[in-house]
Image: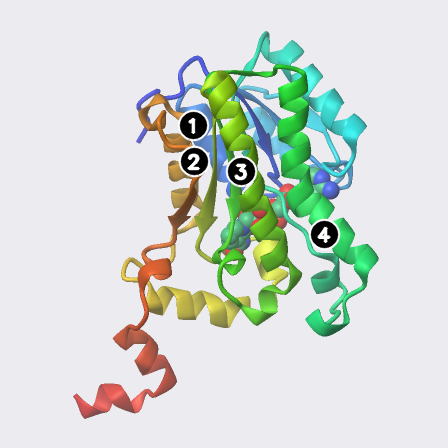
């Protein structure tokens, strides 16, 4: 399915680590829809080399390293992207997340605050840094679209989501803060997409994702949204068909966020429910 809805649009896509990454699927679909873009990831992630396979498949897209926690990397990325793409940017995907306390198995009641700062810097403040850099360089075209990916752990407690829940709350708040300013100044829209649990490298870093994945699938009337489906939604949000949507946290979760009970969940808790019918 491709209708050229991003024909002529220029973008920057953060966070394609491997072919499981949501950003990877977004890049493939953006390319199919006629966009040209720059790919970026942390220098350490690039050493794995997989991003070059994606770049090749996307009409030899240029790859620029950027550690999102570094001002100078962000500045360089935005300047170079405009040079490479020959002008201002129409869309940006922020698809970046990392928790040091989760990675190092520190309990929520015993966090290392240096790591927590790093988690917030990489997973949330980077979104502000990205938008502030674009603002200062006047890098985004009027009616441009900026998206960051988030999770419902920002609103509800999922104990194993740990400090990432707090990081995502901050991320979603930055979308509103900059969404207002970008909207007033240049009709640029800023939104977050709150995705179902998805089996990617970052997703698998969350303890008990297997259980959470099955639970979310059983609660959601449509089941879990896949990475490819999330990419479809991102493409729609980059397109001109969603020009009046801004400052929103958009749930892309098969209905999970609005469902309180499902018989499928009950069957998971008490399999006998099935036999009694
Ligand atoms: N997988 C899920 O269940 C799920 C659900 C909802 C939201 N999300 C969000 O989707 C986004 C993409 O994650 P994913 O699931 O595709 O996993 P992923 O592991 O493929 O992507 C995470 C990316 O963040 C990048 N990154 C980490 N530190 C960085 C740094 N300092 N500088 C630049 N990049 C850095 C990684 O290299 C990687 O490419 C994240 O924001 C994640 O929180 C994921």
| Mark nearer the N terminus (1 vs 3) | 3
Work out whether 152 lies above or below 237: below
Mark 4 CB in 8 Å range of ligand 1? no
Q: Are marks 2 and 4 in contact (CB under 8 Å)?
A: no
Quarter occupied by residue 262: bottom left
What label sits on residue 234 in the rendered view? Answer: 2
Disc 1 on helix, strand or loop?
Answer: helix
Mark 3 CB in 8 Å range of ligand 1? no
Q: Nearer the viewer, mark 3 or mark 4?
A: 3
Query: Which residue is tagged 1?
Result: 238
Query: Which residue is tagged 4?
Result: 119
Q: Is residue 207 left or right of residue 249?
A: right
Measuring 43% from the left and 36% from the top, which residue is drawn there? 234
User: x, y (%) of residue 189?
Assistant: 46, 28
Quarter occupied by residue 135: top right
Query: Which residue is tagged 3?
Result: 175
| Mark nearer the N terminus (3 vs 4) | 4
| Mark nearer the N terminus (4 vs 1) | 4
Disc 3 on helix, strand or loop?
Answer: helix
């Amino acid at each position: 399915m491709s209708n050229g809805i991003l024909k002529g649009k220029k973008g920057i896509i953060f966070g394609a680590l491997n072919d499981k990454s949501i950003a990877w699927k977004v890049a493939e679909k953006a390319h199919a829809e006629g966009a040209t873009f720059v790919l970026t990831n942390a220098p350490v992630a690039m050493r794995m080399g997989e991003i070059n396979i994606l770049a090749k498949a996307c009409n030899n897209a240029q790859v620029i390293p950027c550690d999102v926690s570094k001002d100078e990397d962000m500045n360089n990325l935005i300047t170079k992207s405009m040079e490479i793409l020959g002008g201002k940017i129409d869309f940006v995907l922020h698809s970046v997340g990392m928790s040091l306390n989760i990675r190092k198995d520190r309990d929520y009641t015993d966090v290392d605050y240096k790591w927590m700062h790093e988690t917030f810097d990489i997973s949330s403040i980077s979104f502000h840094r990205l938008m502030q850099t674009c603002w200062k360089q006047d890098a985004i075209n009027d009616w441009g679209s900026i998206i960051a990916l988030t999770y419902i752990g920002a609103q509800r407690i999922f104990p194993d989501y740990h400090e990432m829940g707090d990081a995502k709350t901050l991320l979603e708040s930055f979308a509103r803060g900059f969404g207002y300013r970008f909207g007033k100044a240049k009709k640029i829209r800023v939104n977050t997409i709150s995705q179902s649990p998805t089996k990617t490298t970052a997703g698998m870093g969350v303890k008990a994702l297997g259980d959470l994945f099955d639970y979310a699938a059983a609660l959601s009337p449509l089941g879990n949204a896949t990475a490819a489906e999330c990419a479809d939604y991102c493409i729609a949000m980059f397109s001109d068909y969603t020009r009046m949507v801004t400052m929103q946290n958009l749930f892309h979760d098969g209905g999970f966020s609005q469902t309180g009970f499902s018989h499928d969940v009950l069957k998971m808790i008490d399999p006998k429910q099935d036999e009694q019918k």
